[in-house]
Amino acid sequence: MELDENALSRIIVEAAIEVHRELGGPGLLESVYEEALVCELTLRGLSVERQQLVPIIYKTHVLATPLRLDLRVNKLVIVDPKAVTEWNPIFEAQMLTYLRLTGLKLGLVINFGERLVKDGIHRVVNRL
């Protein structure tokens, strides 16, 4: 069964809550939450690409420095895990740039640095 972006986002949010419940937070490095989230999403049967390099095209030129996506789930949703104590609105702006450059429609910025991770989940949409 094919899942759309909204169905995937629900599963990703549930997985993030489970990771936060299991590991606690705040307090750990972003890379720890990212790795645990990959495990949890994989356990739920999703395909996850981690630290995916995406070429950046400027006009007709491929730039030497690619975009590095933290996570791409089922090739449809970008996930950018954070572990910060203070939210910065630039995180959402960055996600919108990632979505435009990849042509994808939905990104989730998940801040595991919040006391309750559900308060740190931000949906960013690009023409969804």
Image: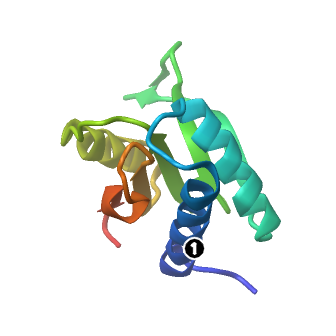
Q: Residue at x 35, y 45 (%)?
A: 95
Label 1 residue SS: helix
Give the total number of marks visible in the rendering.
1
Q: Does residue 77 appear to the left or right of 49 in the view shown?
A: left
Q: Position of residue 87 (x, y in %)?
A: 24, 41
* Relative height, residue 45 to residue 66 (above, below): below
Towards the viewer: 40 or 56 = 40
Q: Amino acid at mark 1?
A: Leu
**Would you say residue 54 is visible in this rendering?**
no
Q: From this viewpoint, which residue is outermost toward the left?
A: 89
Q: How is the image coloured?
A: rainbow
* Relative height, residue 116 to residue 50 (above, below): below
Quarter assignment of residue 86: top left
Q: Does residue 10 appear to the left or right of 105 in the view shown?
A: right
Q: Does residue 81 appear to the left or right of 47 in the view shown?
A: left
Q: Residue at x 52, y 76 (%)?
A: 10
Decide: few, some or many residues near mark 1? Use Cα within 10 Å; few <14, some 14-19, many ≥20: some
Q: From this viewpoint, which residue is outermost toward the bottom?
A: 1
